[in-house]
Image: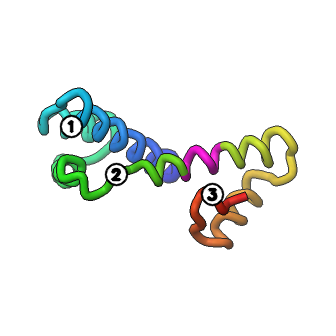
Amino acid sequence: LFFYINLLRMNIQILAQNNYIYNNMNTEEIIYDLENLGFMNEKESRKKSNEIKSMTNIYIKEYMTYLHLVQLYDKHCLRSKKYSINTFIDNILKDGYKPYYLNN
């Protein structure tokens, strides 16, 4: 559950950043989305809103890593049944962070 809530938060941040850049979303709209869609409190939403607006972190790498891990999960757990979900997650945790393009 924790993994999926964090994943949702990351996707909401990506969406908010996209809306800020391309749809001229204002600060209050960003905060509203982060609070109501991303399960953040007001303080955390304001902090993330400032981060999104400052463009100090662009979330492309995180999103690409997520997409790659989903693709690996689909390939190794669902289609080929090479790994159980527990083994798949254990392998990721055991090996530590690797850039998505090295995570085969």
Rounded to the nearest angstrom, the CA distance separating label 2 from label 3 is 18 Å
66 in relation to 94, above or below: above
Which SS class for mark 1?
helix
Q: Position of residue 98 (x, y in %)?
A: 60, 66
Q: Position of residue 58 (x, y in %)?
A: 34, 51
Local secondary structure at mark 2: loop
**Colouring method of the image:** rainbow
Residue 8 coordinates in the image, percent (x, y): 43, 42
Q: Main secondary structure of the magenta part?
A: helix
- Looking at numbered disc 2 in the image, what kind of residue is underneath it? Ile
Callout 1: 10 Å neighbours few (<14), some, many (20+)?
many
Task: Specify the amino acid type for callout 1.
Answer: Ile
In the rendered image, residue 68 lying in the magenta stretch gets the answer: yes
**Residue at the spot 63% in from the left edge and 57% down from the top edge:** 101
**Of 15 and 83, which appears nearest the observer?**
15
> Is residue 99 magenta-colored?
no
Point out which mark residue 101 bears.
3
* Residue 70 to residue 61: above or below: above
2 or 3: tag closer to the N-terminus: 2
Q: Which residues are magenta?
A: 65-70
Residue 96 picture location, percent across and down: 60, 71
Which of the two discs, 1 and 3, labels the residue nearer the N terminus?
A: 1
Dot 3, how many residues are within 10 Å of its Cα: few (below 14), some (14-19), or many (20+)?
Answer: few
Where does label 1 land, which residue? 30
Query: Which mark identifies residue 58?
Result: 2
Residue type at mark 3 is Tyr
